[in-house]
Image: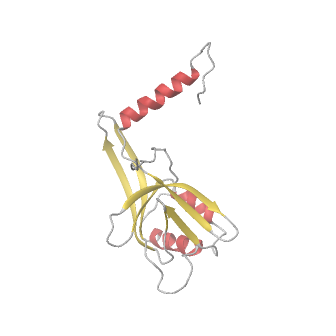
Amino acid sequence: MNAHATPPYVEVESTLGAVLARLAGRDELPLSIEYGERVVQAGYHITEVKAGSFVTLDCGGNPDAWQETVLQVEDIPANDDRRAMTAGKFRAILAQVENKVRLDHDARLTIEIGRPGEAMQVFDIAHLSIGEDAAVLSLGVRAAICKPRHRAEQEAAAASCSAPSSKTRGCC
């Protein structure tokens, strides 16, 4: 059987400040982005930067509020044979935005990305690796979840791990 497998939801998030700090001093490195099973094309373009403030009520009636910085990225090929955008250019774009729009460096960083003609996908930052030849921003799935059920499952898992037991369990 060749069924579609949905990756499990994993809470992964990073802040704008954390990503910018990791890229500081590495301005000459090309910045590649990996999402889904793709590597962004070398001509990728940051089409919009959004500074959002969210106030929500989940399905359990629980209020929540947070700040988020959303980078909208168009995954397009380069017009020539140049490499991907450098970390320095990425940082410069965000600095230019920050001259006109207040960006909260403690805000959750979200990436909306897609190729022309395709639906945009929403990702969190899973990992930022810095090598000698490149910086790679790996994006992680942001799945739709029921927050009250998710919290209850986390609390149950934590409680079962800390409960005394005469049996040895493979837990946590």
Name the image quarter holding residue 32: bottom right
Total marks shown come to 0
**Front position in the image: 25 or 152:** 152
Can you give x and y, in whole percent of width and height, for residue 21 in the image?
61, 61
Measured as percent of width and height from the top left, residue 149 is found at 37, 32
Residue 104 in the image: x percent, y percent? 47, 57
Q: In the image, what residue occupies the spot 60% across and 14% down?
A: 165
- Quick one: which residue is furthest to the bottom in this view? 80
Q: Residue drawn 46% across and 78% down?
A: 77
Does residue 33 sit above or below 105 in this rendering? Answer: below
Examine the rendered structure and indicate whether residue 113 appears above or below residue 143.
Answer: below
Q: Is residue 22 left or right of residue 144?
A: right
Residue 127 image-quadrant placement? bottom right
**Which x, y percent locates residue 36?**
46, 59
The correct choice, above or below, for 27 with respect to 53 in the image is below
Quarter containing the C terminus: top right
Which quadrant of the view contains residue 110? bottom left
Q: Residue at x 32, y 44 (%)?
A: 56
In the image as oriented, which residue stretches furthest toward the top? 166
